[in-house]
Image (cartoon, coloured by chain):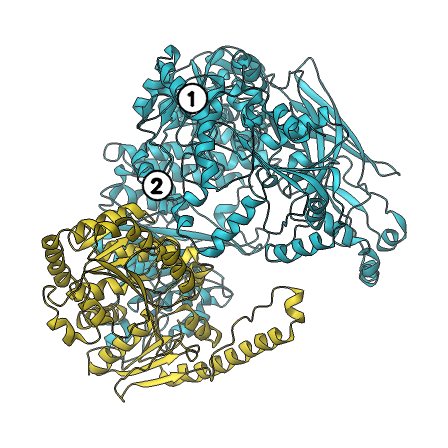
Amino acid sequence: MTHPAVRAADTTATTPPETVWGIDGRPLVTVVIIMFNDIANVGTAIRSALDQTLKGTEVIVVDDCSTDGSFEHVSELARDEPRLRVFQTPKNSGGPGAPRNIGMDNASAPYLTFLDSDDILERHATYNLLTAAERSEADIVMAKTRRRDIAKKKFRGWHHRLYREEQHFDTIEENPELCIDTIAVAKLYRMEMLRANGIRFREELHYEDLIFTAEVFAKAEGIRVIPEFVYQWNLYPIKVRKSITNQRDDIRNLQHRKVALAEVLRVADPASVPALHARLQLKILRHDARLYLNDIAHGQVPNLAPELLAELKPLIESIPTEIYDDVPRDDRLLIASALAEDVDLVSRMAHIASGTWDLYGDWEPGGHRSLWEPETFASYSADSREHMLATFDAAEVVAIPWYAFKFYNAVDAVAIDGKNRVTISGRIPDSFAKLDRPDLTARMLIRERWGFQREWVAPVRWERTADGEVEWTTEFEFPAAIDRAVRPKISIRMELTNGTASTLLPLRVRKGFVGSKQKTQPHGVAESLANIRYQPYATEIGTLAFRLARIGKQRRRLRRAIRPMLSTGQTALRDRYVPLPSHALVAEGARIAAEAPAQLDDRLVVVESHMGTTESDSPHVLAAELRRTRPDLRVVVVAAANQRWAAGREDIVIRNTVDYYRTLARAKYIIDNQSLPVGYVKRPGQIYIQTWHGIPIKKMGFDEPNLEFGSREDIADLERRVGYWDFLSIPSAYFRDTFVPAFRYERAQLPVGSPRNDVLVGDAAGIAAAKARLDLDPAKTSVLYAPTFRTRGQASLELDLAELVDDLGEDYQILLRPHYLNRIAVPPHLRGRVIDVSGIADTAKVLQAADILVSDYSSIIFDYLSLDRPIILYAYDLDDYANSARGTYFDLRDHHPGPLVTDQEELVAAIRAAGDDAAEPLRRRFREDFAGTEPGDAAAQTIATIWGAQ
Amino acid sequence: MAQSQFDRIVLMANDVDRLGGVGRFISTMADGFHARGYATELVGVSPPPEGHGQVVERSAGITVRTLMPEPPPPDWTIRSDADKKDRERMRRYRKRFDLRKIAVDKLRALLAEWGPRTLIICTQVYGMEHMLEAGYDAADPRLPRVVGQYHGSYDGATRTGRDAGRVLQAYADVDRTVFLTAEDAERFRLAGLNNTGWIPNPVTLAGSEIEATAETGSTRRNTIVALGRYDEVKSLHYLLAAWAEIAPALPDWSVELYGEGELRESLQALIDDRAIPRAALMGKTDAVAEVLAAAKIHVISSQHEGLPISIVEAGLSGVPTVSFDCSPGVEMLIDSGRTGYIVAQNNVSALAERLQALAADPAALAQMSDEVRADMAQYAPERILDRWEDLFREMAR
């Protein structure tokens, strides 16, 4: 097939080919640019292709009969550019297929790539694509595309996970996943392969690129994937420009797509490329159909929804049932809703399937084979596709603890009265009865998004109705103290907590919700002048928040004029809420200490744990004991900035603020478990109680080789800080023999015991209550996996969760508590079996709920010994650890509190065998050697030692 | 004249005639390109800071330029209100920008003057940033071509401040960016740089006549040497710690640290406080070849490195290196067990163990000495110049 192509301009240049095409003297890659009425952008696209580092880049522009002068404009450009040729279709074809085919027919290089007239080729694109093709003799090279959101000036990815490293596949069957990148651009094609297989764009169809790429994938021998970014896909605001394939508000769009998809499945012949064929079928369910269902859910096609669903039905039904095995639960329920042609159900399930919130709705209990929305699906026969798809494993959902569940939390109404009292009511469908527990309380957290970032709390009244909905109301006065100078947005979220676990629920609203027109009243003269009023609104992600109401131009001028008035009283707030920059800490800390009154406050106790990031561990156990037994003392708690546990509390000081140093400078007593910041200078008469936060395995303090031979400054600094300590907690004799000399500590030692472990001593029987607190299944054995920190990039955690769950079976549940920098992703369908407990602040509460601990080199094993339950060391990288430069105080291979395993298979066997507790003697021995026996009243003994005499 | 699309090679660095790896690179390469018939220029953005310069002899045919009339003053950043009130600091701040403008203006004129048959090898990001400020557009065919270079490792770049980000940004559009090792090139590639390649640095041993006489250890003393600045990065205290462990067992061996730097006092204090025997801070040396010719083992105990040239220098003179695993470059240069040893980062006892084993086995040490000398020939300047000219051909496609 030949096209009557119009040659626009002849190259008049007579320069030698080496000058034009580089050292090879001929074109190496052809870039085909297609264009229709795009005079504004095409010049940039052409420039990006001509400016390639690869000189042998030929550029062919094919115009689809533009009417805006684009063709003439480009022809003019081609006049002085021998590497640019311009063609035109005989008549407007209305799609990219025809012009791309003309480009292919006229390409003179052995390789070809496409570019759209409003996109950009990265400068090194053709070089990278070409050399990848040459070194691997691949038929197709695929590289990374970045999408540029023109309106927001941001980049977005495009299947980036396929492009993490350079890879080679002999055929698509080796990695059919690649076929989800269906765009024809950002790929290099070997011309000979296209010609030999007669692969062309289907001019009579829309979505011709889907067919083209599917056919290329099916035929390609050698597929090279490279990590370089080669193509910038510009996303223009929809209102301004709309490509054919984005007009999903027209039913013909779906009809065109269906025709194309049928063709896609035909060219990806199941006889020769079965894996590709199956993956494309799955893609139809998970991607193609999904696009239209999402449009319905987001209310973008209000009048078209029933028609779309009717049109989708045969497409969905054309996919064989075995393909559905690879579709996740929520997607299956969504497809079932689509087949039932239930628009409301589709809307709900589309949000759920995209993970915005978790499943809710009616269901008919049936354990692993429960029926979703029986009102809709019970009427279908048991062997129907609808019934099959609506059948789901409810046990899997029931097992997810309430604090790990993303509840849909809908606001019904917002009201603001004349006195700025805000009333918000809403409801949470609790379809799986997770919130039916007496220990739960709720409160609202109202927070300045920037500036001082203060947080206020408000009570929530709530009630669970008989039909499984939680109805709630909150009433509070809108904070009068909001920063008038900065006027931040205000977020509002609902916190559910039982004192151990907690979760934050955003408040869901849609644009134009009931109450969105109301405003608060300004306070006082300045605010009235500036007309500062807040108004509730729906954020871009559909949550409730408050922002400043708009004002007119004149008022804005006035607001600017009275700015100094609005900024009064800021110093005190800054002292209280804004941490000092780190470079100012030393000077400011010293200054504040020097200016403090000579007399210390004998009643003031400052408590800090893990640099203010938690309200647990020994310092807080001591604080609680002090509050109980010594009401004459005043305990002030240090919180790092933005700690949720500190919200609404009066006894908080924020770390590294001016107020923090002032408080430290006045306090007679300081309790800490790590180290105070560099700005702290100890004042005469202060008593510093160091509880520390674990028993060491790795060498510490002056025993670390880094410090053992460190600079004089480093050594002096550590000596100074340790010199501040007046009392040190001593968890065990082993600690006394290692830690104390390692830090050259010479002052008073507290009686043996760890305050934080008081609660664990003799608590072996409390496991049922502990499991209930964490919403765990009391009948299952809970296995806590708490590995120590591993440097990112160097050693990854080696645990295949899906396999572990499979191997252990129904009788076990796994609790995960990795270091916060080593998060482990739990696959969605395992969330009932594998529970991430890293959000539970108090480690003791987690330990209490664990039947078995799996750890490695973490000091958590010493704490867990107090419970006298089985411990397994999963030390897959023991060799690295044992040989590490830092060195250890003892060799775990010689001393361990339970089985030492190095791969997952051994781990499973050890967990299964833990019930017999054959390792009990080993544990007892280890405990005697390293942990000692916790007295259970270490907090009381500590307090008696320090305050007893007074 | 060489067969190439370029007539002129410009080697650009922060400063010319400064001690250190980049300084040696541009000098060696300038000599080599000049000898192969290219017009050759060396461009320093500024004069080297006081005390860091050295006198280098080179052919009169090589042009040397310095863009700034004087070195920019240190301590110039303005971070706080206090800084703004510091008048001296503000003066330095303004001075810095005045100098930068002078450099940029000069560069703008030079770029136009040099034209498209010039290749600029920009050895440091700082220079590239000046060129970009001078309006350099890699896509403009009337301007010189640029090959960017980064002499550190990817790990080092991500650890020391903003280097990695600066490399990714400044070199994004130039024709090529060349790293010292394949691994560094690959890691920058995965981090988003689209024009990566790699060529190691050439190595010459100043005073190679000594090399010829330094045969089989006859003139060598039982010495372990280190050639590195006394600073946190080179962390020589690890070597001292290792030596402290084995010194009693090796009574006829000694350790000599050649260099200078801000940690001199700390290191000396360490030696004194711990009474570490036969360990000496030798100060800076200009006679690296002689030092190596008289030594038996070379040690690198750094926190990170690029492609440590001292491994090659030591190797060329028949001295194997025992090094921490502190950069991909070390892995590339040392075939552990054959041409030296690599031990785990900061693992003092492993370092001590290797040193002691080598010192105690003269036959193994001699064998290793021969292996390493043969191996390092690939870094000879002529071989490296060939690789650069291969790159020019590739760039002409």
Q: Is residue B127 left or right of residue A360?
A: left
Q: Position of residue A36 (x, y in %)?
A: 46, 60
Residue at position x 34%, y 19% from top? A910
Residue A856 seen: yes
* Mark 1 secondary-structure assignment: helix
Which chain does the numbered disc 1 sit on? A
* Mark 2 secondary-structure assignment: helix
Q: Is residue B221 left or right of residue B98?
A: left
Q: On the image, which quarter does residue A696 sit in? A: top left
Residue type, numbered disc 2: Cys
Q: Position of residue A882 (x, y in %)?
A: 32, 36
* Number of other residues with Cα within 10 Å of mark 1, as a class: few under 14, some 14 to 19, many 20 or more: many
The quarter in which the C terminus of chain B is drawn is bottom left
Which chain does the numbered disc 2 sit on? A
Residue A46, relative to residue B91: is it above or below?
A: above
Q: Nearer the viewer, mark 2 or mark 1?
A: 1
Query: Which residue occupies the foreground of this view, A697 or A514?
Result: A697
- The answer to the question of whether label 2 and label 1 lie on touching residues, with beta carbons closer than 8 A, is no
Report the disc number at residue A85: none
The residue under label 1 is: A927
The first of marks 2 and 1 along the sequence is 2
The residue under label 2 is: A179
**C-alpha separation, residue under disc 2 versus residue under disc 1:** 56 Å
Query: Which residue occupies the foreground of this view, A216 or B69?
Result: B69
Residue A393 seen: no
Q: What tint does the image give chain B?
A: yellow
Q: What tint does the image give chain A?
A: cyan
Q: Is residue B26 left or right of residue B335?
A: right
Residue B88, relative to residue B60: is it above or below?
A: above
